[in-house]
Amino acid sequence: MPINYYIFLSIALFAIGIVGVLTRRNAIIIFMCIELMLNAVNLLLVAFSKMHHMKALATDAATTVGTDGQLFVFFIMVVAAAEVTVGLAIIVMMYRNIHSVDVNFLNRLKH
Amino acid sequence: MNALIISAVLGVVMMFSSFLLNKRSTVRNIAIGGLLILLIINILEMNGVEFFNVNTRDMIAFDRFALLFNTIAIFSTLLYVLLSAKDMAKVGVYFADYLALIFFILCGVMLVSSFKSLLILFLGIEIISIPLYILTGSDKRNLKSNEAALKYFLLGTFSTGLMLMGIALIYGAQGSFYSVGISNIAGETPSALLIAGMLLLFFSMSFKVSAAPFHFWTPDVYDGAPTVFTSFMATIVKAAVFIAFIRLFDDAFGLLHLRWKLLVAIITALTLFVGNITAVFQQSVKRMLAYSSIAQAGFMMLSLYAMNAEAKEGLMLYVAAYSLATIGIFAVLIKMSDYTFDGFNGFAKHQPLLAATTTVFLLSLAGIPLTAGFLSKFYMLKAALGTGKHLWLVIVAVLMAAVSVYYYFRVIQAMYFKEGEKQPMEVSKSFKWTLVLLAALIILLGIFPNLLLSWLYF
């Protein structure tokens, strides 16, 4: 498949994520949209990785070009997991105090 | 590499000491000892003594620029812990864990100051950010702290998403995560992917250093977070991200500078304008300092704009001057019970030494001669002039520096020329002497900047 398909799919997922972050009011849904953005990046990285690998294969059969893109994806996954733990803890902490996860609550500091 | 590994080990040590040791003073002493060790081995590394030899596949390069900044960061953290450890213990019961998080943040700081690959940049930024989300929300019962943590977390991860998209697009265009590989465009016109990726990286980094128009989270987060941690966030962390910013755009996108110079100039001018003008209207000193940190970020952006040898020297000096002065002011502010300007009324009568040192810090931030703040601003303007283009940017910067004098001097005026009642305040002797040391360092750097800058070259 041409690389453009992957690029358009990733950009679309990423855009959906951004729109979700900007329009939704529920902290957990915003959080899921951010995860969607990260996963769009993962898809794109894997696609580019494959693309660079295929390009390099044409000249050298034992090439490792392009593997670093896939490695990056693992790091993103690990970091995303770490972010989830901290993020959910923060949301739970907020829920304990105000019994809601609505981000409209975030206006106390604006004065 | 020395300090990076030891700092991670010390973080783990602090985590263990949180349940093995009961006395807070012991934990504090371990942290201070650890920071001293870090400082010493980092200075040793600057002189060529390396304890660890790890093959990082050229992803990390501890050059002089990185090492000097690490020294500044560790030293500022040491002073910060010396001044504020007691107040840190007041935030919650997890005193040792806060210190552990600070050591982990230092690891991130050392990574972002020395990266050669976008992978390390990403990991470093995240290692800095994730502990900071926790520290921001560490005052668990306080709604303001909750709100600040959630806001910081959502916007921080959002900007990380933008950064990752930028990195992915750059990888698609250049097939490499290394700064060297990215800058390798060999005279051809850069592809649309590369430009889009560079813009996304630029926006997300501006987000992290709170440059306008991406600054809107800063005042809220700085205001809501416990004041001790605001101090750390606004100084060492911000400085580190700036170092990463300038490294990224120097190493990876240096050849593309014609395409981003104007954008950086506009964002710099906007940051200076928004930060300074909004700071004038603040009633709370803490919030004023948050806007002032945006304004100072604008000045540091000048080095990104100029990007020559002077800009790098200037940034180093600026980072040192800004961190020392802001840590000092926050340390005094934490002791106050009233954060408004009126809270400082008559401060000079009741606490003459504290008022005098605070005055030195404020003068340095405002850029009055004989302080480090003046010389660092001078270096920045000189570097920006050296590019020979966009003279209006320098004019804006000078005008805004004049505006900043107004809100810094409001505090000085409240301290010295207004009558006020004495506030209860517990100030130890060592606290006072550390503040005096800070003020002395600021004046020393203001007279002999080469004490710091010569480290860049030998």
Image (tube, helix red, strand yellow):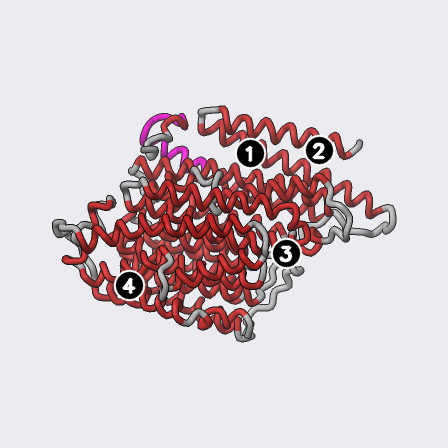
The image shows residue B114 at horizontal and vertical percentages of 57, 59
Q: Chain of mark 3?
A: B
The residue at which mark 2 appears reads as A7
Q: Please give the chain letter of the residue carrying mark 4.
A: B
Is residue B3 placed above or below B286 in the rendered structure?
below
Residue type pointed to by label 4: Leu
Amino acid type at circle 2 is Ile
Residue annotated with mark 3: B251
Height in image: B26 above or below A36?
Answer: below
Please tell me which of labels 1 and 2 falls first in the chain: 2
As drawn, the label of residue B292 is: none
**Which numbered mark, 1 or 3, is in the foreground of this view?**
3
How far is mark 4 from mark 2, CA to CA? 55 Å
| Labels 1 and 2 in the same subunit | yes
Q: Position of residue B344 (x, y in %)?
A: 21, 50
Q: Is residue B436 left or right of residue B42?
A: left
Return the residue at label 4.
Answer: B435
Question: Magenta span covers which residues?
Answer: A87-102
- In front: label 1 or label 2: 2
